[in-house]
Amino acid sequence: MNIFLQYILLGVAILVAYAVLALILIYVERKVCGFFQCRIGPNRVGPWGVFQSVADMVKILLKELVHIDKADHVLFRMASFFVIIGSICTFAALPFARGVQAIDFNVGIFYVLAVSSLGVVGILLAGWSSNSKYSMIGAMRSGAQLISYEISSGLSLMTIVVLSGTMQLSEIVEQQSDLWFIFRGHVPACIAFLCYLISGHAETNRGPFDMPEAESELTSGYHTEYSGIQFGFFYLAEYLNMFIVAAVASTMFLGGWQPLHIPGLDGFNAVMDFIPGIVWFLGKTFFCVFLALWIRWTFPRLRIDQLLSLEWKVLMPICLVNLLLMAVVVIW
Amino acid sequence: MTNSAALLVVLITAVVLVGAALLIALWLAPRSYNPLKGEVYECGIPTRGTSWMQFRVGYYLFAILYLVFDVETVMLFPWAVSMREMGPGGLFGVAFFLIVLALGLAYAWRKGALKWK
């Protein structure tokens, strides 16, 4: 009975954290986007418009699910399950603070890479099953983009695994207690951080890399035919994936929930220790999220061939060389 | 709580979230039907044909290349963990492995597989 209660509590906690973070992220995105475009952003529902995304969530639940005659209905429904499962399972592996981590495999970072790529299956299914040309083209582009950028994000995370000698996320964070990996790893860690930010950003289908849903040519890409809450699932997963990428970047490179420590300055370190871990984690993660939003609202959209050649001809060779460089640095 | 049990719980949570939200939407949302609404969207003109057709081969080439390099990533992770114990010998082995792969990439590049025609 006791263990059963624990399971239910875990499920509810994950669900609440997931939903609340999604609402916060959508609000932050709209507000930041507003400021980047010299607007105010949402400001009607509640003070500073903070309840805008709650209102939108209720609205989207009440919208009609349009029935497409020629779609493959089983796959059409299944697609949203895949997308959400991929993002929640990755989300549960994030270390929020000391001990606040639902899933802590000893192959943690490998698990994160593996499960987060489940989203590609959902996106391809969505595009295929809709039986619409826009969805099909969007899904194909998205598939090519996601799988390509997965390689360089995997390689740049592997650079940190080489440095730390473990794949367990809690252990990786623990090792950064005196100095974060981005400072300790010399030049290769900084290069890997940049590569991960770029490829992670591309993996979330956002910003200059939003080819799959390029609204000026594809209406909205792979979710053109989705309506109501089914569209909402794709939207939710997109925002949470942005958070997950930022959180993995801050866990692997910026020390996760570890406070900022400078060796030798004991007084400074003691003051930093007073700030709780969860604040550090969320602070770093939202810093990375802000970077992602900044990139999104600054750069124009790439073409699909530019996008793929950026990955295969630039990022991946850099990541491979960088991996060897890190190995050399660690051994000698 | 073991990790695998937690993973199972999280999986069930995800399925329940999607399922429950779908059920709520099906229960609360209005429903109406007419033949035009069931059409696939195509700029407002009547839909022509199906979209389940042959597709550009370029995507397939990238998928094959991805397969090669993703399997390579899987093989490199164990080395990355035990790199300190293996020392320079392991590093040279992996460097050789990577050079062979890089030759493969160079071949694909030369053959024009990376070019979008």
Image (cartoon, coloured by chain):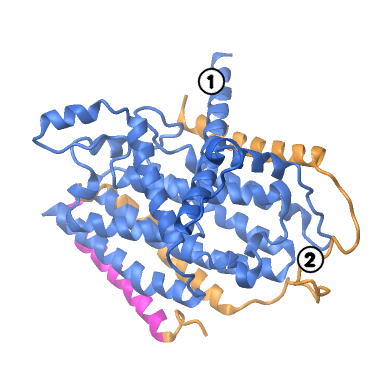
Left or right, residue A181 beside residue A140: left
Q: What color was chain A assigned in the picture?
A: blue
Amino acid of disc 2:
Val
Establish if A213 lies above or below B27.
below
Q: Chain of mark 1?
A: A
What is the secondary structure assignment of the residue under circle 1? helix
Crowd class of label 1 (few under 14; some 14 to 19; many from 20; radius 10 Å): few
Q: Position of residue A32 (x, y in %)?
A: 46, 51
Magenta highlight on residue B101: yes
Name the residue rendered at 28%, 54% in the picture.
Answer: A159
The answer to which quarter of the image holds residue A23 is: top right
Residue that badge 1 annotates: A6
Total marks in image: 2
In the displayed image of the protein, which residue is found farthest to the left? A264
Calculate the distance from the C-alpha at mark 1 to the C-alpha at mark 2: 46 Å
What number is the disc on residue B40?
Answer: 2
Task: Say which residue appears at 51% left-offset and 38% top-offset.
Answer: A21
| Residue lying farthest to the top in this orientation | A1
- Which image quarter: residue B107? bottom left
Hue used for the chain lettered B: orange
* Chain of the residue that carries numbered disc 2 in the rendered image: B
